[in-house]
C-alpha cells in the first residue's frame, strides 16, 4: 500500500504543479485586466507569473534549459490561464476564496519543490530555503515589476512569503530525515493552511515604523558600557566566592 502511494505522489505533485501554473496565469491575467493591457500584456504577465520563479531557480542551479521551456504543457497551461482571465473577471467571493486556497496549496508545493531540487543539486540548507522561496514567489515579483507595481511580497499585504518559507523549512527537515515524499505532502498542507489562516486573520508582518530603533549612538555606547561593567562585577564576585573572602568566619 505504501509503495503504491509513493508511486502516485509524482503524478499528484505534477497535477498540483500544473494547477499552480494555471492559477498564476490567471492571476497574471487579472493584473493585466486591471491595467487595461491588450492580449500581449495578458500573455506576458501570465507567463512571467506562472513560470518566472521556476525558470530563475533552474538557471541559478545550472539546470538548463529550464523545465518550463522543455515541457510544452507549462507554456500552454499558462496561456490558458491568460485566456481565462481575459474572458471572466473571477471577482466574486466564492472565486476569491477558491483562488486563495488553491494559491496556498501551490505555494507550499512550489516552495518544497524548489528546496528539494536545490538539496538534490548538492547545495546546503540556506540556498535550499532561498531557492524554495524564489520558486514560490519569484514569478509574482517579476509579474508585478513588469506591470509597474511594487511587488506585493514587500509588505502591506497578508503573509505570503512567510508561508512559503515555512513550507521550504518543512521540506528541508523532511529531506534531511530521509522522508522527501512525506515532506512534500506536509509542506503542501502547511502552505495551504498557513496562507488560509493569514488571509482569514489578516496577518501581516510589522511595518518599518513599528520597529525603528530610537536610541542614539551615545545611548547605545552607554548601554554597552553598563553591560560590560555588570559582567565584570559578576566575574569579580564569582572569583571572590571561589577563593574565599577576608570576612569568611572559617578563616
Image: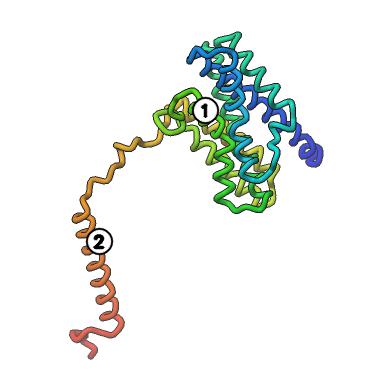
SS at circle 1: helix
Q: How many marks?
A: 2
Identify the residue position indicated by label 1 in the image. Answer: 196
The picture places residue 241, in percent across and down from the top left corner, at 28, 80
Question: Around disc 2, counting alpha carbons within 10 Å, would you say few (fewer than 14), some (14 to 19), or many (20 or more)?
Answer: few
Residue that lies at the very extreme toward the bottom in this rendered image: 251
Identify the residue position indicated by label 2 in the image. Answer: 224
The alpha-carbon separation of the residues under discs 2 and 1 comes to 43 Å
Left or right: residue 136 versus residue 227 is: right
SS at circle 2: helix
Q: Nearer the viewer, mark 2 or mark 1?
A: 2
* Residue 104 appearing in the image: yes
Q: Judge by depth and name the residue closer to the eye, 148 or 169.
A: 148
Quadrant location of residue 8? Answer: top right
Quadrant location of residue 223? Answer: bottom left
Residue 81 is labelled as none
Amino acid at each position: 500500500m505504501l509503495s503504491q502511494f509513493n508511486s502516485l505522489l509524482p503524478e499528484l505533485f505534477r497535477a498540483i504543479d500544473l494547477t499552480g501554473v494555471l492559477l498564476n496565469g490567471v492571476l497574471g491575467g487579472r493584473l493585466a485586466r486591471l491595467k487595461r493591457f491588450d492580449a500581449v500584456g495578458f500573455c506576458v504577465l501570465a507567463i512571467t507569473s506562472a513560470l518566472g520563479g521556476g525558470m530563475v531557480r533552474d538557471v541559478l542551479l545550472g539546470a538548463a534549459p529550464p523545465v518550463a521551456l522543455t515541457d510544452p504543457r507549462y507554456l500552454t497551461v499558462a496561456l490558458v490561464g491568460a485566456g481565462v482571465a481575459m474572458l471572466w473577471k473571477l471577482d466574486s467571493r466564492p472565486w476569491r476564496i477558491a483562488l486563495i486556497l488553491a494559491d496556498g496549496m501551490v505555494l507550499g508545493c512550489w516552495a518544497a519543490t524548489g528546496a528539494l531540487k536545490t538539496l538534490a543539486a548538492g547545495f546546503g540548507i540556506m540556498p535550499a530555503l532561498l531557492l524554495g522561496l524564489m520558486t514560490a514567489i519569484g514569478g509574482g515579483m517579476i509579474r508585478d515589476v513588469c506591470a509597474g507595481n511594487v511587488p506585493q511580497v514587500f509588505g502591506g499585504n497578508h503573509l505570503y512569503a512567510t508561508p512559503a518559507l515555512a513550507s521550504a523549512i518543512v521540506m528541508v527537515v523532511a529531506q534531511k530525515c530521509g522522508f522527501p515524499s512525506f515532506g512534500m505532502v506536509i509542506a503542501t498542507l502547511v502552505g495551504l493552511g498557513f496562507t488560509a489562516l493569514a488571509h482569514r486573520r489578516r496577518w501581516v508582518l510589522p511595518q518599518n515604523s513599528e520597529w525603528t530603533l530610537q536610541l542614539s549612538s551615545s545611548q547605545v555606547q552607554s548601554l554597552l558600557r553598563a553591560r560590560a561593567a555588570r559582567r565584570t562585577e559578576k566575574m569579580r564576585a564569582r572569583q571572590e566566592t571561589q577563593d574565599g573572602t577576608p570576612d569568611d568566619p572559617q578563616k
